[in-house]
Amino acid sequence: MSSASPVQASDRSFFLFNAIVSVAALSLLSWLLLFHGGMQGTDVNLRFLPGVNACLNASAAALLVAGWVAIKKKRADLHRYFMVAAFAASACFLVGYLAYHAVHGDTKFGGVGPVRTVYLVLLASHVLLSLFIVPLSLTAFWFAWKREFTRHTKVTRWLHPIWLYVSVTGVVVYLMLSPYYPA
């Protein structure tokens, strides 16, 4: 029986790491949204964060489009910078999102009728697709770092439209929810 090659062993270790990070992020987010409910009675005020987070989502979307244009123009150097910047914007968004919900809990949408249905459908698609961003983006970065661009491209064919959709709908969700944030 032959042993695994170093590439396969390093992939296995990476995918284990990726799974642990992805499950940890999802678990923390689920706990914050479903069970935590915020820190009542605290003087910490992070009510500015939803607006900042929307700007981070908009920035990530613009950077994703710029990165796509750069790679189509065969500017791998620019593509790399735009993708790292998009990842940084999304990572900062995630930190801000977690901090806001840890302190203030969830904000309920107050709209009624058809606008509520639109909001809930948009939110559901946004949340469900966002679950794929962390594991797919880490995988795309892994393959790019290893210079396995065929595998990188296979991942990003799925990642790019999902990440772009989640970034754009994050801004739309914020705009729809903004009248209901406490002052």
Image (cartoon, grey):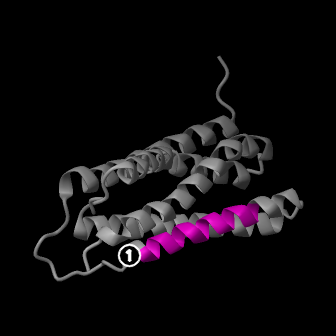
Q: 83 or 100, which is in the foreground?
A: 100
Q: Residue furthest front?
A: 113
Where 180 falls versus 5 (above or below)?
below
Q: Report if residue 65 lies within the magenta region.
A: yes
In the rendering, at what x and y percent does residue 18 appear? 51, 46
Q: 98 or 25, which is in the foreground?
A: 98
On the picture, is 53 further left or further right than 44?
Answer: right
Residue at the image position 49 percent from the left and 62 percent from the top? 172
Residue type beneath disc 1: Leu
**Magenta span:** 51-67
Answer with the quarter of the image where residue 155 lies. Answer: top right
Q: Quadrant of the C terminus?
A: bottom left
Residue at the image position 51 percent from the left and 51 percent from the top? 134
Q: Residue furthest top?
A: 1
Q: Quadrant of the N terminus?
A: top right
In the rendering, at what x and y percent does residue 163 appear? 59, 53
Tally of marks? 1
Q: Residues within 10 Å of mark 1 (few under 14, many from 20)?
A: some
Q: Mark 1 sits on what residue? A: 49
Q: Residue furthest left?
A: 41
Dot 1: element = helix
Q: 111 or 100, which is in the foreground?
A: 111
Residue at the image position 43 percent from the left and 76 percent from the top? 51
In the rendering, at what x and y percent does residue 74 appear? 89, 60
On the picture, is 12 further left or further right than 122?
Answer: right
On the picture, is 156 further left or further right than 183?
Answer: right
Q: Report if residue 134 lies within the magenta region.
A: no
Magenta-colored segment: predominant secondary structure: helix
Q: Residue furthest right?
A: 74
On the picture, is 164 further left or further right than 179?
Answer: right
In the rendering, at what x and y percent does residue 181 appear? 29, 71
